[in-house]
Image: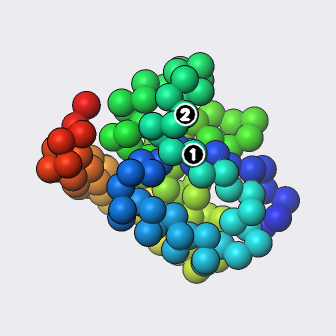
Amino acid sequence: MHDSPPLRVYYDGICPGCRRDRARYERWAGEAGKQVAWCDVTEHQQELRDKGVDPRAALLSLHVEEEGGPIREGIDAYILLMRRVPRLRPLAWLIGLPGLKPALRWLYDGWVRRRLAREGRLP
């Protein structure tokens, strides 16, 4: 999928699990991974504000921007990112199912809030 527009992924670079997920994605993505710019939310706060995204919201949920497109967040951001990697495409389809997507969003949001609270970083 080298003809896909580049992505900017705004993620929590302080989170060890998030960094591991990024490294795993880069391994699995291969060449397609070169079309992804990883941006630590804490280092790109003004850029996020300029794009209309509250940096606290970006800390609470993954945000992905496709060049020339809107910024997607949460499960929609994961779907956009996962569609770029052949082995993750079935999972992207699965998590996008209408009945499953809201439940996953609720679980994901709760997990992130608990992690940030435990770390003393909950905005």
Residue indicated by mark 2:
44
Does residue 97 show up? no
In terms of depth relative to the viewer, which is nearer, 106 or 2? 2
| Quadrant of image for the N terminus | bottom right
Query: Badge 1, how many Cα within 10 Å: few under 14, some, many 20+?
Result: some
In depth, the one of 100 and 80 nearer the eye is: 80
In the visual, does 114 lie left or right of 81?
A: left
Question: Which residue occupies the foreground of this view, 15 or 25?
Answer: 15
User: Do the numbered discs 2 and 1 sit on residues whose CB atoms are within 8 Å?
Assistant: yes
Quarter holding the C terminus?
top left
Q: Is residue 70 visible?
A: yes
Residue linked to disc 1:
39
In the image, residue 33 above or below residue 47:
below
93 or 1: which is nearer to us?
Answer: 1
Mark 2 or 1 closer to N-term? 1
User: Mark 1 belongs to which amino acid?
Assistant: Cys
